[in-house]
Image (spheres, helix red, strand yellow):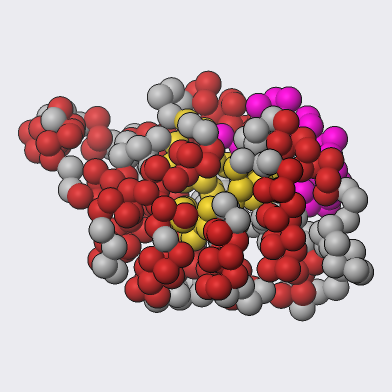
Amino acid sequence: MLAPASNRTRSNPLSDTSCPVLSLRFQHHGETLSNVDRILEGALDIHVHFGPDPKVERRAGAVEIALQAKELGMQGVVLKSHEYPTHPVAATTSDLVSDITVLGGISLDTEVGGLNVHAVEATANMGGRIVWMPTYSARADRQAKGLDGGISLLDDSGSLVPEIHPILDMIKSHDMVLATGHISTAESLALVAEARNIGVQRVVVTHGTTMSFWTGMTLEDMKELAGMGAFIEHCVHVMMPTTHRLDPKELANTISAIGPEKCILSTDFGQDFHPMPAEGMRMGIATMLRSGMEDVEVGMLVKDNPSRLMGT
C-alpha cells in the first residue's frame, strides 16, 4: 500500500544525475534534443488557464505550470482567467520561478465590470500585457450555448458601443495587446478595424479556428482580419477528442492559407482533462510537423509571432 501522499517522496527524473542517459541529455542539452524539443525551446504559449478557478476544474496552479514550462525550455506562458485579472498571479509566479517569462492581463467579463476602462487601467498600471474582450460574458458565447443576455460590442445600428473607445485608447497608450475574446465575427471585424485605425499595434484574434465552431468564423474572415494586421491564434485545444476534434491536417491547411507569418499556435490548456500546458504545446508542435508543416513555419507559430505580439 502506498504511503499517504503527504509522506511520499516523489522521484524527479530531471534531477537524477545517477542515470547516465539522463545526465548526458541534460548536460549536453542542445545536442540531444529532437526536432520537436528544439522548436519547443523558446516557445511562448499565449493562452494558459490555471487554478484556482470559480467555474472550471483546473489541472494545476500557475507555479506548477511555469515550472514545467521552464523544465521543457520554453520562453514562457501568458496566464488567462475569465473571472479575474491575472497579472498579480503572473508577477508572483515570476518571483518564485526564475528564468521564465510569465505574463498576465484581464478579460472584460461581468466579474470585472464588463467593458470597464478603469479595470483595464489598473491592469495596465500594474504591468499587465493583454486585454481580452468578453469571453464567457460575451453575447456571442452565450448564444452559442443557448443562453440569453451577454455583452455585445455593437449597438443596434452595428456601430461599436461608446465604452469601447476609451478602452482602445488605454490599450494603445500602454502598448498592450488587444485580444478579441469570444465575441462574434461581426464584432471582431469592427473592433480590429477601429483598433488599427487609431494605431493599436498589437492585436490577436482569439482562437479563430475554435470560433469557427462557436460563431461560424470562416477562413475568409480570418484572412480578412489578418489582412488588417491581426495575428490569428489557433489552439491545440480545438483538435482534442474532448472538444471539437478538428483534423490536424485541416488546421495546418488553414494556417497555410492564412500564412504562418500571421498565425500563432497556443494551447488554451489548463483543463483537468487535458495535458499540462507545456506538454500540450510540445504535442501541438509535433502534431503540426506530422501534418506537413515545416520546422521554420512551426517555429514562427510558437516562438517568433507570439514574441512579436507580446513584446518579449
The answer to whether 158 is drawn above or below residue 305 in the figure is below
Tell me the quarter of the picture where residue 4 sits.
top left
Give the x, y percent position of residue 196: 67, 48
The image quadrant of residue 141 is bottom right
Residue at screen point 60% across, 61% down: 225
Residue 242 in view here: yes
Provide residue 290's location: percent of width, then percent of height.
25, 66
Q: Which residue is depicted at the point 78% across and 59% down? A: 137
Residue occupying image coordinates x 65% and y 33%? 175
Can the viewer see residue 279 in this picture?
no
Q: Residue at x 40, y 42 (%)?
A: 304
- The answer to if 104 sits in the magenta stretch is yes
Q: Position of residue 85 (x, y in %)?
A: 71, 39
> What is the span of residues highlighted in magenta in the rendered image?
103-127
Depth order, front residue of 289/173? 173
In the rendered structure, does residue 231 fall within the stretch colored magenta?
no
Residue 153's x, y, as percent? 82, 59
Horizontal side, residue 109 vs residue 199: left or right:
right
